[in-house]
Amino acid sequence: METTRQFHYGTVLEAITILREQGYGHDFTVYDGKLKADGRFFCPDELEITDVYRYEGDTDPADEAIVFALSAQCGLKGILVAGYGADTDGSGQLIAQLHYRYLRP
């Protein structure tokens, strides 16, 4: 079983860039109660969270985001960037249903 990484990237863009280099080449979006990537739809039980990076804005709550590295059972790997606070796109409910592959510290 994989364990959580012990580092944190300075910005959302840096996290996305490094995750892309690690093979997380697709972008996940929330669409109609499911997660969508590469033209396919995934239910929460088809995905695992393999990494999470949380960012808090210094002064603006709109700068708050969480970067999720996701792996699908079919082998597809991608990234979901979600805001936290107000759940306007329904991603919070979906994310709560995802399974973590790594052990939390």
Image: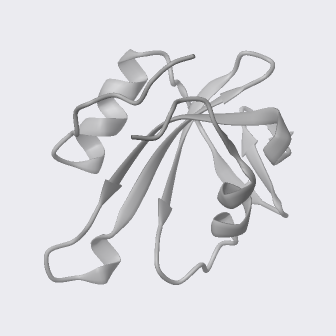
Please tell me which residue is depicted at 61% across the width and 80% down the height of the picture.
Answer: 88
Give 97 or 39, whichever is nearer the viewer. Answer: 97
Is residue 86 found left or right of 57 in the rendered image? right
Please tell me which residue is depicted at 27% across the width and 44% down the height of the picture.
Answer: 13
Q: Quadrant of the C terminus?
A: top left
x and y percentages locating residue 97 in the rendered image: 75, 54
Q: Place residue 34 in its image quadrant.
A: bottom right
Give the colour scheme of this rendering: one colour
Give the mark count: 0
Is residue 39 found left or right of 15 in the rendered image? right
Please tell me which residue is depicted at 21% across the width and 71% down the height of the picture.
Answer: 57
Give 58 or 7, whichever is nearer the viewer. Answer: 7
Give 24 or 46, whichever is nearer the viewer. Answer: 46
Furthest residue to the front? 105
Q: Quadrant of the N terminus?
A: top right
Q: Place residue 92 in its image quadrant.
A: bottom right
> Measured along the vertical axis of the image, is residue 36 above or below residue 21?
below
x and y percentages locating residue 24 in the rendered image: 51, 24
x and y percentages locating residue 31 in the rendered image: 77, 59
Is residue 13 found left or right of 86 in the rendered image? left
Is residue 91 found left or right of 42 in the rendered image? left
x and y percentages locating residue 66 in the rendered image: 42, 56
